[in-house]
Image (tube, helix red, strand yellow):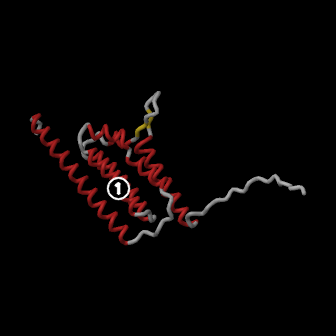
Amino acid sequence: MKLEIEDREPKILEWEVLPPEEREKRSGLESLFRWVALVMDELIAFPTTKFRFGLDPIIGLVPGIGDTASAVISALVLIQAARRGLPKILLARMSLNILINEVIGIVPGFGDAFSFWFKSNKRNYELLLAHSSAPGRARRSDWLFVIAVLVILFVIIAAGILVSLLVLRALVQLLGLH
């Protein structure tokens, strides 16, 4: 008895975790997160090193509005993630990255140095890539959660602006420029 082994190329099976329309929505979201992470956290490379940074720490050098602008951009991306049905726990982790970057970014000097290292948008992009479970549709509770996070983020941003304005006013008075 002779056993013949056929020499065939192995078939590669693609497992469809997401329905096609959900996969298309997610791929658009992935490119948005990748673009924001690139521009805000990875745009410029230090020569002869692997260290990269983006516009986030540069914009953050402008008191008050820099950190606010960065947080607003990140929040807009978070809104898109909620609209496309990402799970609340993933939205919570992404929100936490934005909040950490904003809260520490408010501190003059140290906050800007922290932004060079922390890279909240890049972290959020990596979280999105690591997410592999099938999505559910965004529910009302998801929107309530995101709105609550955005309200907290707004309060923190407003506090940062207020602190920056108070510091600038104190500097103006100290220098006698008023």
**Secondary structure beneath label 1:** helix
In the rendered view, does 102 fall on the left or right side of 168?
Answer: right
Image quadrant assignment for residue 5? bottom right
Residue 43's place in the image compared with 76, above or below, is: above
Work out whether residue 89 or residue 85 is closer to the camera in this orientation and state it: 89
Q: Which residue is found at the position 48% from the left and 53% from the top? A: 130
Q: Position of residue 24 (x, y in %)?
A: 55, 62
Q: Which residue is found at the position 35% from the left and 56% from the top? A: 95
Q: Position of residue 63 (x, y in %)?
A: 25, 42
Q: Tally the numbered discs.
A: 1
Residue at the limit of the structure toward the top, as seen here: 48
Image quadrant assignment for residue 87? bottom left
Residues packed near mark 1 inside 10 Å, few (<14), some (14 to 19) or many (20 plus) = many
Quadrant, the N terminus: bottom right
Give the residue type at disc 1. Answer: Ser
Q: Which residue is found at the position 62% from the left and 61% from the top? A: 15
Quadrant, the C terminus: top left
Q: Position of residue 137 (x, y in %)?
A: 45, 69
Q: Which residue is found at the position 43% from the left and 31% from the top? A: 46
Work out whether residue 96 or residue 106 is closer to the camera in this orientation and state it: 96
In the rendered view, does 100 fall on the left or right side of 164?
Answer: right
Residue at the limit of the structure toward the bottom, as seen here: 140
Residue at the limit of the structure toward the right, as seen here: 1
Image quadrant assignment for residue 77? bottom left
Residue 101's place in the image compared with 142, above or below, is: above
The residue pinned by badge 1 equals: 95
Q: Position of residue 17 (x, y in %)?
A: 56, 63
